Amino acid sequence: METEILLFILALAAGLVDAIAGGGGLITLPALLWAGLGPLEALATNKAQGVFGTAAASANFLRRGLIDLRSAALAFGCAFAGSASGVLFIRHIGGDLPPWLIPALLIAFSLYFLLSPRVSDLDARQRLSQGAFAFLVALPIGFYDGFFGPGTGSFLAMGYVALLGYNLSRATAHTKLLNFASNLAALLFFLPSGHVLWRYGLLMAAGQFLGAWLGSHLVLRHGARLVRPVLVAASLAISFKLLLDSSGAMAGIGF
């Protein structure tokens, strides 16, 4: 029961963070791994709960007129296709990853978010057409989201601001739409494999939905200045714990 309560709270926080700054997967994925799920089960369950958060945020942004569905349609399709390909790839290799790889990647991305310029500080002109953005940005980031995932929202938001010249609010809104596409594709392609643990997935989905609804309402009034340090600190703490666990397991079997 304590684990389930903690997962609900972390999912709520992740939904809030993800709607504002992106990177909610940096909270939920390591939390699922910490709860004892294997790599494939954690990735699949993370997508199941993430669909609800990105759907809630996208619906709210769409209602407020921040999403242009016509211009985003091709990028939506590319993010969906890329994510489906990423899931097929990770299923093909069977999630047979070194135990230190996921926490190491999480630490690397956390340091990147800590040291990189904030998205709200970027002031860029449009450098790519919508079509080029869809194939050169949405497609590969969608693949990454299906294969791994944490940080997808932040990468997409940076792409929208730096390459299409969107302001922070429009970038965040369109990012949630593409993130919904990649999460939905990943969930649909994980379902036949039976890797989704619905006991945790539905519980965290409720937290994600509530957190994303709240976060999407705060986007126009607050930035990521307070959220980002908390996100990085939590991710680093959980990742170091995972590294310690994996090193202990390797020591126990003679490595």
Image (cartoon, grey):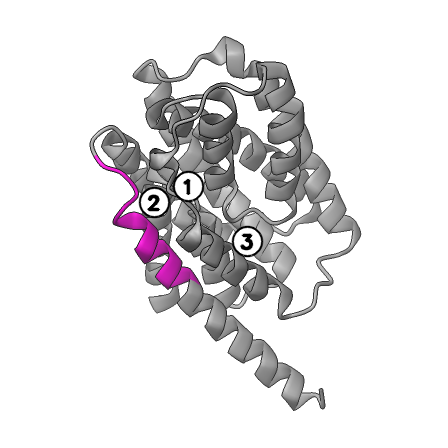
- Disc 3/disc 2 C-alpha distance (Å): 23 Å
Residue at (66% x, 83% y) in the render: 250
Foreground pick, 1 / 110 = 110
Q: Residue 97 carries which label?
A: none
Label 3's element?
Answer: loop
Label 1's element?
Answer: loop
Q: Is residue 28 visible?
A: no
Mark 1 or mark 3, earlier in chain: 1
Q: Mark 3–mark 2 contact, CB under 8 Å?
A: no
Give the position of the C terminus as an image quadrant. Answer: bottom right
Q: Which mark is residue 197?
A: 3
Extreme-right residue of the structure: 92
Taking the magenta stretch, the answer to whether it contains residue 236 is no
- Point out residue 249 in the picture as x, y percentages from the top left corner: 62, 82
Q: How crowded is mark 3: few (under 14 residues within 10 Å), some or many (20 or more)?
A: some
Q: Residues within 10 Å of mark 2 (few under 14, many from 20)?
A: many
Read off the magenta span: 222-235
Label 2's element?
Answer: helix
Residue at label 1?
Answer: 22
Q: In which quarter of the image is residue 124?
A: top left
- Point out residue 231 in the picture as x, y percentages from the top left corner: 36, 55
Residue at label 2?
Answer: 17
Foreground pick, 12 / 121 = 121
Amino acid type of the residue tagged 2 in the rendering: Val
Give the position of the N terminus as an image quadrant. Answer: bottom left
Amino acid type of the residue tagged 3 in the rendering: Leu
Foreground pick, 166 / 76 = 166
- Point out residue 156 in the picture as x, y percentages from the top left corner: 51, 34
